[in-house]
Amino acid sequence: MITDKDMATKSRKLRGLMQQKLDVRGRDLRQSLRRAGRRLPRSVRKRGADLMRAEMLAHNPKTARQVNAIEVDQAYEYMRAHLEAIDVNEQRKTRILSLTGAIIANLLLVVLLFVVWLWWRGYI
């Protein structure tokens, strides 16, 4: 059987990791996972949903017996391992490079359309 305190510490640690790695804040695990959205893979979001359900059940002593502690520990370790493996600097580089690539592609498209317009109007 898992207690409310165990779930609270696991939730707090996961929220701290999400804040550190994904810059996502929330008052509870549900809000943090919702704000993380698609930045987390589907399997991690599914494990997070399992943890949210277990956290809700752990608040009541009668329903806390329904929670499988082994599954909760596996889901917690899976999420923790994924979040710790995230490289913040690599994410930042990827985001900057993709933004730069999009800007350059748009500028090339505008220049190409301008040249086509000049050709169409007979200036070239």
Image: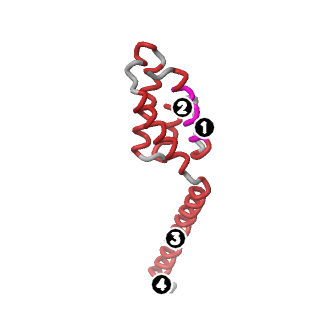
Q: Residues within 10 Å of mark 1 (few under 14, many from 20)?
A: some
C-alpha separation, residue under disc 4 versus residue under disc 2? 69 Å
* Relative horizontal placement of residue 107, taking residue 78 as reference (left or right): right
**Residue farthest toward the top in the current orientation of the protein:** 62
Q: Which mark is residue 108?
A: none
Q: Which residue is mark 3?
A: 110
Of the numbered discs 1 and 4, the one sitting upstream in the chain is: 1
Q: Which mark is residue 16?
A: 1
Query: If the image is split into quadrants, where does the N terminus sit?
Result: top left
Mark 2 or 3: in front is: 2
Q: Secondary structure at mark 4?
A: loop
Mark 4 or 2: in front is: 2
Image position, residue 7 (x, y; %): 51, 26
C-alpha separation, residue under disc 2 versus residue under disc 1? 10 Å
Of the numbered discs 4 and 2, the one sitting upstream in the chain is: 2
The residue drawn where x is 57% and y is 46% is 22
Q: Which residue is mark 2?
A: 10
* Relative horizontal placement of residue 54, taking residue 14 as reference (left or right): left
> Which stretch appears magenta?
7-19
Mark 1 or 4: in front is: 1
* Vertical position of residue 111 compared to residue 21: above or below: below
C-alpha separation, residue under disc 4 versus residue under disc 3? 18 Å
Of the numbered discs 2 and 1, the one sitting upstream in the chain is: 2
**Residue farthest toward the left in the current orientation of the protein:** 66
Q: Amino acid at mark 4?
A: Gly
> Is residue 14 located in the magenta-colored stretch of the structure?
yes
Q: Residues within 10 Å of mark 2 (few under 14, many from 20)?
A: some
Q: Which mark is residue 122?
A: 4
Q: Residues within 10 Å of mark 4 (few under 14, many from 20)?
A: few
Q: Circles 2 and 1: CB distance less than 8 Å?
A: no
